[in-house]
Structure formats: structure tokens, C-alpha cells
Image (cartoon, helix red, strand yellow):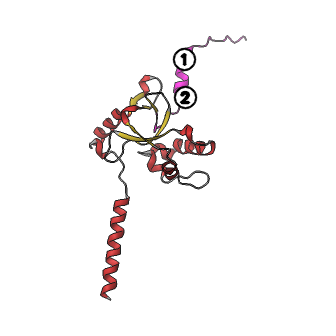
Amino acid sequence: MVQQMMPMDIQGNRETVAGNKKQIKHIGKLKEDNSNVAIIFRTVPEEPTHCLVIGPKFLDDTNHNAFMRALESQEAQQSFELGSYLTRTSFPDGTNMLAFLHQGNFMKKMPTKNIMVTHGTGADGQVSLDELNKLIAKERGVKLSELSVEDPTPKQTEDAEKKTSAAKKASTKK
């Protein structure tokens, strides 16, 4: 039996490749030059029209690979903000990822209108981050300014101060 070869269909191959592409959250491109970025926080407190991004290409090979594994992990993909997950993640040397990215000046604040979020193939799989944030805020029934992750530090500081104050009062009563 002679098996007949079917001619390659370019469109079919594109669809196959597109179908096999893994959909990854928290990634985008700069509108100005198409550079790849990872979106660490979609909004910044008190600046809802700005976000924090990094260009993974600026990390050394070891940290780049570890960062990409973290980005593609199930936990990161389920996280509302990538930065929240990175606070609990370390590079191979044990350094906290978010702290390293912040202290190493890898994170850049950018206007959300300058970032295209890529969530599929072609132009249909892209949306401007500012528009995506508006959609998310509407879906959650909150203002755009309420999307940013709140810094837990002020609450922790307030709680610590209350405990310290209560301990001082208790020790002076003895």
C-alpha cells in the first residue's frame, strides 16, 4: 500500500502552532519597540495608570531561567498579580525574587497605556494593559484605583505599635 502525502497547508500549520501555544498570564510587550516584559504589578498604589514591569532579558542566564520557571508555574498563573507570588519565591541562590528585582533596579514603572498584554496569537490576542485593567475593575465592581495590591506594611506597623503600647502599659501597672 502506498501512502499518499498530503501537501502542507500553511494556514493549518499556523493554527496547529497557535493551538499548541501555552497561554501565559503576566506577559506583554512594550508598544514602542515590541520588547518582551513581565508584568509584575498591573497597577501601582495611588497611580492606577502605571504598572511595574521587568525585561527578563536583562537577568543573567541562571536568574532568567529561574524567573521564567516561576512565571510559568501553576501558582504564578493562578495569582492575581505576579508580584504577589514572587514575594514567596526565591532564585536558586536563595535570594527572594521580588526583593532582588526591586533592589537590583530591574523593575520599571511604565504607563499602562504603553504595554500590550499578549494573551493569544495575532492582533486578536492582544489588549492594551490600561483597557484590560478597566475591564478587570468593572468585572470586580471596583474603581481602577482599587485594583492595586495594598502594602501590608502599614497595617503590620500599626499592629506592632499597638502591641508595644499595650506591653508598656502592662509593665508600668506592675
Residue at the far right in the pictured view: 1
Quarter of image, res 48: top left
Q: On the picture, is 111 further left or further right than 61?
A: left
| Amino acid type of the residue that numbered disc 1 sits on in the rendered structure | Gly
Q: On the picture, is 81 further left or further right than 18?
A: left
Tell me which residue sits at (51%, 38%) in the image.
55
Q: Position of residue 6 (x, y in %)?
A: 63, 12
> The magenta stretch spans which residues?
1-28
Q: Quadrant of the N terminus?
A: top right
Quarter of image, res 162: bottom left
Confirm whether the magenta stretch covers residue 5: yes
| Amino acid type of the residue that numbered disc 2 sits on in the rendered structure | Asn
Element type at mark 2: helix
**Tag 1 residue:** 12
**Tag 2 residue:** 20
Q: On the picture, is 90 further left or further right than 108?
A: right
